[in-house]
């Protein structure tokens, strides 16, 4: 039985993180945390959940992930190597996936930079 990860919704808005299973879902509807913005809301017997809505919420939920660029959080243990060009730093993962690395985060991945062997 797979667990889903979400943010509990309280009277004050989104709160702490929690998990629930598909079997626990009573129903799903739409919730508007902001004007003109609707997201799924999962009602269970014990609580009501929504999805993680921002990178900041993901950062709080997954503290082991490192923000290597303004738009990403990266599991640095999964990086196979990093390439560096005059224009960019790029983290490479298994399966050909990549993520950008900001220049000011170079020190965090320096040990993974693939050096040309000339």
Image (cartoon, rainbow, N blue to C red):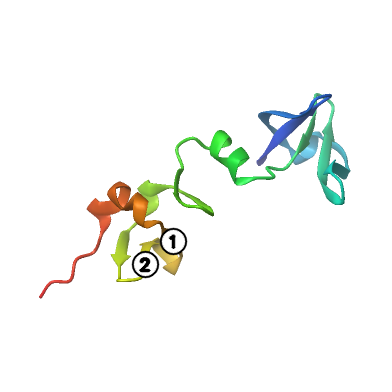
Left or right of 65 on screen, residue 1: right
Mark 1, Cα crowd under 10 Å, few <14 / some 14-19 / many 20+, is some
> Dots 2 and 1: beta carbons under 8 Å?
yes
Earlier-in-chain disc, 2 versus 1: 2
Please name whichever residue, 72 or 43, is drawn nearer the observer in this view of the structure. Answer: 72
Q: Which residue is mark 1?
A: 100
Please name whichever residue, 112 or 28, is drawn nearer the observer in this view of the structure. Answer: 112
Residue 48 lies in quadrant:
top right
Q: Of helix, strand and loop, which one carries label 2?
A: loop
Spot occupied by residue 76 in the image (x, y as percentages of width and height): 38, 48
In the rendered image, the quadrant that contains the N terminus is top right
In the rendered image, the quadrant that contains the C terminus is bottom left
The label nearer to you, 2 versus 1, is 2
Spot occupied by residue 31 in the image (x, y as percentages of width and height): 86, 42
Please name whichever residue, 69 or 109, is drawn nearer the observer in this view of the structure. Answer: 69
Q: Mark 2 and mark 1: span between their CA atoms? A: 8 Å
Left or right of 49 on screen, residue 104: left
Q: Which residue is mark 2?
A: 88
Q: Of helix, strand and loop, which one carries label 1?
A: strand
């Amino acid at each position: 039985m797979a667990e889903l990860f979400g943010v509990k919704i309280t009277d004050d808005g989104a709160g702490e993180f929690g998990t629930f299973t598909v079997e626990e879902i009573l129903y799903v509807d739409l919730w508007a945390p902001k004007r003109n913005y609707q997201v799924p809301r999962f009602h269970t017997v014990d609580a009501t959940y929504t999805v993680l809505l921002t990178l900041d919420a993901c950062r709080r939920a997954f503290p082991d992930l490192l923000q290597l660029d303004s738009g990403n959080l990266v599991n640095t243990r999964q990086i196979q190597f990093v390439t560096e060009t005059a224009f960019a730093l790029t983290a490479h993962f298994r399966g050909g996936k990549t993520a950008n690395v900001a220049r000011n985060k170079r020190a965090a991945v320096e040990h993974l930079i693939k050096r040309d062997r000339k």
